[in-house]
Image: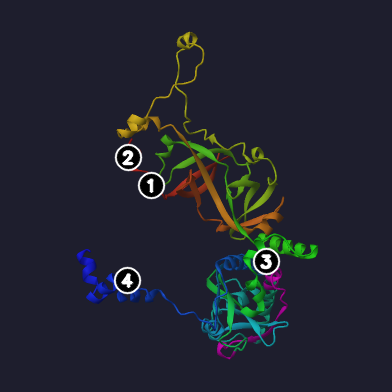
Amino acid sequence: MSPQAAASLSQDDIDRLLKGGGQPAAVVASRDSDIQLYDFRRPARVSRDRLRTLEAMYERLVRSLEGWLVARLRDSIDLRLQSVEQISYAEFLLSLNTPSASFLVRIQDAGNQQGVVDFNPSLAYFLVDRLFGGGGAPTILERPLTPIERMALDNVADRVVTDLMEVWWDHAQLSLAVSGFESIPEIMQAVEREVPVLVATVNAKFAGGTGVLSICLPLNVVEQFFVRSGDRRLSEPVGTESERLKTREQAEGALRLTTVTAVARLPEFRIPMRDLLRLGTGKMITTGIPTDTPLDLLIGDQPRFRVQAGRVKQLRAVSVVEVLSGQSIESLINSTRGRTAPELRPMTAPSADNDALAAAPAAQPPEFADLGAALLAGGEVPFAALIDITLPVRIEVGRSTVTVGELLRLGRGSVLQLDRLAGDPMDLYVSDLKLAEGEVVVVNEHYGFRLRRIVAQLPASLTEG
């Protein structure tokens, strides 16, 4: 036994171990810190699988609400889902501002239980300002909303409730309606204070500030969503034909809510290592891609759409010009992919003497040298052998997170908003490495890329070669 181990055990501990008395008390006590009491009054019902589904559902609500608001406010507003979590109603009330802008939501067949849609003051006054035709920075007042201001914000709350019913319809057919307004959270009796609730928090970013939208539902009104077994969905189909059809519809509904990432980028081209080493801030790359070439919209690293770049309000966006889904793999490969930019040096084959070629014997399989000895000896590949190798380059215009259902509805003429403002820099990737940020320019009716900032530095040993 090492001196350290002996020093940490008392003689009684050593005697118990020798007699088979189990672990020493010190070791058992050290594990007590990992033990947490289970709260039977508020059991955790949101598993990881359920949480992913909930996040996908509320992401769908956020995107629908954002589009509706942009059309009516005639101003840009960016909504992002922050979290979906289970807390007590008392904890939810503590998170609200005073005075608040909270709308009570009546839930049919739920007794006296109600939901809550809350706009924090900065978001509430921004919406009121824009709904009444304002255009400057909104003034945030420390007072309750007036009746006229409530009526304007009531339309937004109705839209939130409508979208909420839609995203829950496949799991719990809720009948919801705005039933009242309250500006003092402490007296808002939607449910009992210890009742667990499901709260979705949405962050809003707009001109002049940020805000928060909170959507609260009593957990027991969507109980059927949490009690369904995941194992049942993986078992063999059972029951009558109508039951199997209903199960299939539920599975399809859940699949349509799954989110995927869509990436819009210019067709891939290639750059020799020699030119790559000379890149720096302010330098420009000519891609060799004509400006009338459509962009690629990739789903899971596969081009599925040809798109045209544009913008919606202040956000970058793309419009679908061709759908590639369902075609052969060859049809998904861009005809311009793999080209080397015309102003960059391509990799060339070594020259040969014509007389030597004439006297050369018939073609034979090449003999490759054994590099094992050089590898064991620590041999290195000469830098000159790498300098003209061409590497794939991609310019990413922007990204968007969409559900499978939204993806299936994309067609010619559909518009998809991206996650970047029109003036934001674009990313330049070499292979899978983000190398630089910059802006797309036009050079002789071809796309170019001017570097603003180098993100990843190449090794000094390469730049000095």
Image location of residue 264, percent across then percent down: 59, 50
What range is drawn magenta here? 164-187
Q: Are marks 2 and 1 in contact (CB under 8 Å)?
A: no
The residues tagged by marks 2 and 1 sit, at their Cα atoms, a distance apart of 11 Å
Name the residue tied to disc 2. 461
**Residue at numbered disc 4:** 20
Q: Earlier in the sequence, mark 1 or mark 4?
A: 4
Is residue 112 visible from the viewing direction of this image? yes
- Residue lying furthest bottom in this view? 187
Position of 13 relative to 358 (above/below):
below
Tell me which label, 3 or 4, sits earlier in the chain. Answer: 4
Marks 4/2: CA–CA distance? 62 Å
How far apart in space, not on screen, are marks 3 and 1 (Cα)? Answer: 43 Å
The quadrant of the picture occupied by the C terminus is top left
Q: Most extreme residue toward the left, as rendered?
A: 3
Q: Tell me: residue 342, above or below residue 282.
A: above
Which dot marks residue 457? 1
Q: Amino acid at mark 3?
A: Ala
* 394 relative to 454 in the view: left or right: right
Judging from the image, what secondary structure is the residue with disc 4 in?
Answer: loop
Q: Amino acid at mark 4?
A: Gly
Q: Looking at the picture, which amino acid does disc 2 mark?
A: Ser
Q: CA distance from mark 3 to mark 4?
A: 75 Å
Mark yes or no: residue 63 visible.
no
At which x and y percent is residue 455? 42, 50
Quadrant hosting residue 161: bottom right
Foreground tag (2 vs 3): 2
Q: Kindly indicate whether the residue at mark 4 contacts the one at mark 3 (C-beta within 8 angstroms).
A: no
Label 3 secondary element = helix
Of the residues under marks 4 and 2, which one precedes in the sequence?
A: 4
Q: CA distance from mark 2 to mark 3?
A: 54 Å
